Amino acid sequence: MLGLNRLSIQTKMILLLLAVSLSSIAVVAWNSYKSGREALIRAAEDHLKGVQVAKTTTLKAMLDSLRDQVISMSDSHVIIDGMKDFRAAYKSLNAASLTAEQVEKLEGFYENDFLPKLAEQIDGEPVLEQYLPVKPAERYLQYHYLSNNPHPYGMKQELEESESDQSAYAKVHETYHKAFERAVKIFGFEDVMLVDAESMEIVYSYQKTSEFATNLETGPYANTLMASKVRTMRGNNDRDDFKIADFEPYRPSLGKPMGFAVSPIFEGPQMIGLLVLQFPIDNFNKVLTGDFNWAQEGMGQTGETYLVGPDKTMRSRSRFMHSDSAAFLKLLRQSSVPTSTVDKIEKQNSVICALPVESESVAAAFRGQNGIMVVNDYRGEETLSAYGPLELNSLRWAVITEKDLAEVDAPIHQLGRTVLIVASGMALAVTLLALMFSHLLTRPLRALTEGALRLGRGETDVQVRVKSRDEFGELGRVFNQMSENIKLQTERLEGQVRENQELLHNILPASAVAQRQEGDEKANREFADVSVLFAEIVGMEELGSKLGEAGALSMLGDLIEAFDEAAEESGIEKVKTIGGSYLAVCGLSVTRPDHARRIIQFAQQMERIIGVFNRDEKAHLAISIGINSGPVVGGVVGRRKFLYDLWGDTVTIAKKLSVGNRTAIRVTSQIRDRIGDQFNFGSSHKIEAEGKPVIEAWEVVH
């Protein structure tokens, strides 16, 4: 079929491997790209929605805090008392008058200072008569606290006491101005104003801008949002009520966007005034822009969060104007934004309350909806836009978080390129693997052959690496298991040999073990000069009748174990124990010139062990020890169950010396002569031994 019969097996395997592998690579690559793209889009959407919600929550908390501040301040004694005092002082000036010189200076303030600065920020030319105060109290206060104030406009609040004002108002101002200054600086307000609820006159202003002392019903600023909220609040006549006035270009602040919080001031059941807190948009901008650190907030190169007011214009700074105002203005002039609007933005160097934003996400936010969609932003660029409303009282803003769709899609395009490169690399790798496969097929056989040769040479730690799961792989695993079994059997056999050696050393002296390893099973040997100790524990029968045979045997085992440890520390070799008898030797396996001294020290240690035992167990055991030195013959007794034993007169005499019913160490003259005056001895006495000459013995005394 298709000429396959004419192809070699190697060629068929290569073609089959390529067909299966390349099709698998194509499927995996497509699925990887598809799932990765969905994950990246979802991550971008979740990030933008998370930022939008976080910013909205922060702004809501700021507005709630502002509400709490204006309500709590309006109910404070300082505000209530100040409202009463300022209102009374203001009314006392209704008949006040200015000299012609003072009137001229007041008009000069407007013509030469305030209006020229205002004209730089607004469209058109402000008219003096529209702003100049006309009522006596207005003119009097604005003269003494604005035009005759040595501080520049915007810093008029630095005047705490007017030297030219000798009215009662000056004393009231001096009393309360410091307290209001503290509130402004602590809470970050721009201005604090007190408005007479009856006359709607601004009887006090901390900042002393041009609205100070004017009337919010008939004065030049009666059309501001702030004045509208004040009039509404007066009509409600509800305690602890509040209103938030949206940001607007506020002319007393030279066109800067300002917002206001209003709350009534009550004395008992009567509303006597209204507290107005003026706050700048700067704090809101810091939250929305991350203090102008968009990139550090994870918004990339084009991401931003901005605020839109009910009039569908911006209420916060634009990232793009902040980064490059010239390029941004050029872009706006090329868009559908009216030229007059762009001129206004350029003049005030800000988009706030000027740049219209009419995207679908803004409209949805003002409908009270939350979500995310793709829209064209205020630049006309396609963006991914997360939106939601921000509401407090009658105020509603739209909070928009956007990022250019091109930047959102950039990781997706990069993922596509990466998947394509990886897939191409995998295809090349598969082709090379197919060419190498025929060669690799024989690699398991070579590994098995090499492993078998190593195993035949006696190596036991042989493992072959065969990764395939075919018959070769199964053969490799069987071989490795066989090699592991041989290794385990060898290790087990070596362990048994070691155990036998350790057991043999526990039973026989080292010299006897060496002889048996050399083929001498009986290990008979003559030793010319050793010291032999034979000890008898006296009183075990009485202990057995008291504790029982099992208890006495356990006690005996503990004593023998203690004797063995002391013997090992002293260089003494135990030969055997039978019941309460203990046979030991020094100088047998290891030649020791001081074997006599060592054996006596060991005997003294045995005495101490018996003493400690008697004290702890309240027993009455004794140990009678005989010590002699001289030649002995040692050897193994038995074939299967064997032990090591010593023969000779030296052993017999030591055993004879151990006979007694009290604790004592008895030595022969050979021992005494060897150690000289290293130990103290009592007087000698004679001991008869059957078939032996009389033995002269000495007791070691302490």
Image (cartoon, helix red, strand yellow):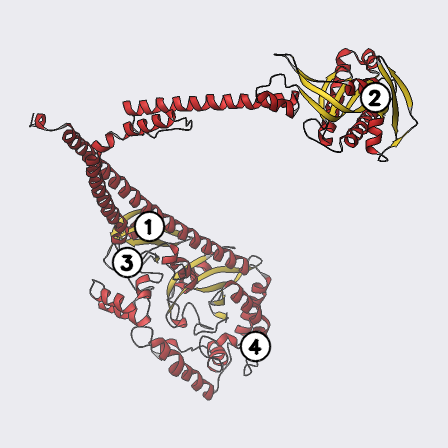
Side of 445 where 521 appears, left or right: right
In the picture of the structure, the residue carrying the numbered disc 3 is: 357
Pinpoint residue 499: horizontal percent, then vertical percent: 57, 22
Which disc is residue 623 wearing? 2
Pinpoint residue 169: horizontal percent, then vertical percent: 56, 75
N-term-proximal mark, 4 vs 1: 4
Q: Disc 2 marks which amino acid?
A: Ile
- The answer to whether mark 4 and mark 1 are in CB contact below 8 A is no
Q: Most extreme residue toward the right, as rendered? A: 683
Kind of element beneath mark 3? loop
Kind of element beneath mark 1? strand
Question: Gap between marks 4 and 2, in whole Å?
Answer: 117 Å
In the picture of the structure, the residue carrying the numbered disc 1 is: 387
Query: Which quarter of the image is occupied by the C terminus?
Result: top right
Q: Is residue 355 above or below residue 653?
A: below
Callout 4 crowding tier (Cα within 10 Å): few <14, some 14–19, many ≥20: many
In the picture of the structure, the residue carrying the numbered disc 4 is: 170
Query: Which quarter of the image is occupied by the N terminus?
Result: top left
